[in-house]
Image (cartoon, rainbow, N blue to C red):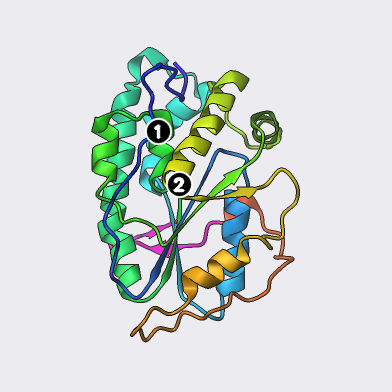
Amino acid sequence: MSHTDRSEDWTSVVLDGPSHEYPGRLLAVEGSDGSGKSYFVSWLMAAMRDEVPCTHVLMPGEHMRAYDLWRAWSDESLGFERSLIDDIGLKLMAVGDRLVRLRAIIEPALQQGHLVICERYALTPLVFNSEAMFSEPLRRLYRPDLGLLFDAPSDLLFDRVLARADSPVHPQTRHDKDVEVRRFREVAEKNLYSVVDTRQPNDFEDIRPLLREMLRPRAGELSRVPANPEDSTNPPPQADAARIPLVRTFLGGMNR
């Protein structure tokens, strides 16, 4: 079974979740593997380092990604019998994990005035399954102040992932990748996400006005959030594992 549900009844869902009223800002970063999300997060964290407190939230969280069946579902090289993996159950767990992290990490950070950067926020689960059992719980997530979809042609993304030295053996074909990318574009358009073309090296010049507008203080708001992100066209190179900064979970542990 593929990660991407090939059923003909997939539909693009509009998530009409509530808006938050906290002093912080919520940025959602979406896109298929290989689209440059982690590099952008690294750039943004470096750009904001001395200006705004940032909290990076990767979804699903570390504990889900370390779960044996999740790893086996994502990597065929582990040799686990796939007929024993209930992919619907795992996907529901991933949706639930997003709600848990909303309450435990995102809300406290927004209350403290942080820029919360959510990587794989609400759209990713919808790309793979759009049924009500997935979409209805996701409507409890806050609407982001800014949503970005990182996008490139599906063949390019497929080749980028394949070229990674530590790439797992995904049970995904080029056709699956194409379906996934097209769905990301549809659901992003429905939910008013801005699209970032990452087929070429990107200095994020087109994104900066969007970031400035998102970070602009609201009427009557006293905030440490500046109107302009620091110019950081050439972020320092970082290994993939170092791109995800430590985030205190308020549950007694640290997540990457």
Please name the residue that numbered disc 2 is placed on.
120
Q: Nearer the viewer, residue 104 or 114?
A: 114
Q: Is residue 136 left or right of residue 54?
A: left
Does the segment drawn in magenta span residue 200?
no
Please name the residue that numbered disc 1 is placed on.
12
Which image quarter is the N terminus in? Answer: top left
* Residue 145 in view of the camera: yes
Q: Position of residue 123 (x, y in %)?
A: 42, 42
The main secondary structure of the magenta stretch is loop
| Badge 1 density bin: few <14, some 14–19, many ≥20, Cα 10 Å | many
The amino acid pointed to by label 1 is Ser
Q: Secondary structure at mark 2?
A: loop
Q: CA distance from mark 2 to mark 1?
A: 17 Å
The amino acid pointed to by label 2 is Arg
Say which residue appears at 35% left-offset and 69% top-offset: 109
Say which residue appears at 38% left-offset and 72% top-offset: 24
* Residue 252 in view of the camera: no
Where is 17 relative to 156, above or below? below
